[in-house]
Image: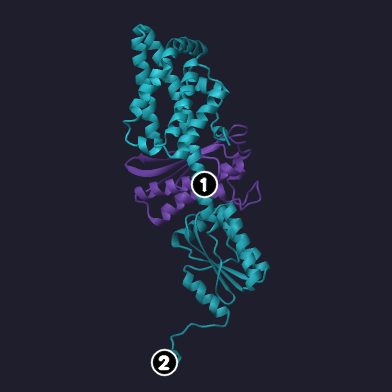
Chain colours: A cyan, B purple
Amino acid sequence: MTGSHASGMDTMTPEGLLALYGLKQEELEVLRTFGERVGDHLDEMISQWYGWLKTYPEFELFFSDPAVMERARGLQERAWEVFLSGKIDENYVRRRVEIGEVHARIGLPLSAYFAGINHFLIVIGEVAGQLGVPSEEWVQISSIITKLMHLETAVVVHTYNAVTEEALTAQAKSLMEMSTPVTEIWEGVLLLPIVGIIDSHRAQDIMNAGLTKIAETRARIFILDISGVGVVDTAVANYLINITRATRLMGCEATISGVSPAIAQTIVELGIDVGRMKTTATMQDALAGAFRRQGLEIRPATDGDVR
Amino acid sequence: MRIPITEDRDVARAVLEGNRRAAELGFDQVKQQKVSTAISELARNIIKYAGGKGAVIIRTVTESGREGLEVVATDRGPGIENVKEALEDHFSSSGTLGLGLPGVRRLMDEFSIRSEPGSGTTVTARIWA
């Protein structure tokens, strides 16, 4: 799992990142020399940083457990050490990916992460002042630190997003799996309301669920209502045509209901030939047609029928 | 707004963004549907033909006082050998309907395509309010 979120960003290699953020080896060397001078103060810097963190409004939410806090502090100390050593290699990138993963998993907002980064810059500036780093030298060092900090932030944010999106996709997928409820609404009549966007997986799910239900119920009519479908492009039309064909092979007739005026016009402009596909404007029309073909009719109840 | 297209869910994202923008511009239902469909078509092409190496850019454009929506679909795929053929109805290199690109051209008011075999394809389409 670790490191898997590094994929998808073309430049997620140490070399690619350094090039993208305009960091040269000489600069990393300058950072390393500075890092050595700061090294002795690292512990006090971290203490100061945590002093600030405790004032952060949501601190309690994330660090109520002292053991968690201790662990985080240890990891952070190492992260800062590596940062100040200017050693930007695969290990460095992997650790930053982990930081992004952890932050996303515990739900720490990115705004808190940015505030933390900002405070790190403040702390390091103060230490530089204490060490008496000449201002012209500090100008160079702080520009290097800023570039590296941006690089680091990019990796963390990219990972954070990837983790969050993964969770969203998983949610969407489980919703999708629940979204093909083919129901036998009357003897021999199946209904499937389709809502959302149809992609190839969804189309396959619909095909499978529909055909299975046809075999089970020996249904003669399968109504697919697309009034909740956002887009009918050529791919979706193709799926619908194929579902209709397969349905017919099983001795059942498919009707696509809920074709809105906008969808009808779009299909025509696309130039799609719906051929023998049966379509209706409303689900009501489809249902009425289905009952007719089953030799049934819906009529107002006479007094005698009402019980 | 630039939406990278690498997988199916990105298509949905691009479609939703296009639909939102079209609604903001006050496009009627039919026009909204056209925009969404064109975006869906172009974004799916990026996945199908360019292995998901591309993006859809959706922006509002103004020209001589009228407002419209511009959709740019750009990819770093293999490019199209024969653009003229690809714009003909029922020409398909993948066994599907072969109406995608010509369909987009009909749905939108303006359409242009630039393709370089080996380096990619960029389709720019506009629709006016």
- Residue drawn at point x = 65 percent, y = 70 percent: A216
| Crowding at mark 1 (Cα within 10 Å: few <14, some 14-19, many 20+) | few
Q: Circle 1 sits in a helix, a strand or a loop, which is it? A: helix
Q: Name above or below for residue B58 compared with residue A258.
A: above
Q: Name above or below for residue A72 compared with residue B57.
A: above
Q: Amino acid at mark 1?
A: Thr
Upstream in the sequence, badge 2 or badge 1? 1
- Residue drawn at point x = 62 percent, y = 68 percent: A213
- Residue drawn at point x = 59 percent, y = 75 percent: A188
Q: Which residue is mark 2?
A: A303
Q: Circle 2 sits in a helix, a strand or a loop, which is it? A: helix
The label shown at residue A169 is 1
Residue A296 quadrant: bottom right
Q: Position of residue A155 (x, y in %)?
A: 49, 29
Give the CA distance from mark 2 to mark 1.
55 Å
Q: Which tag is nearer the camera, tag 2 or tag 1?
A: 1
Q: Position of residue A94 (x, y in %)?
A: 55, 28
Q: Is residue B10 visible?
A: no
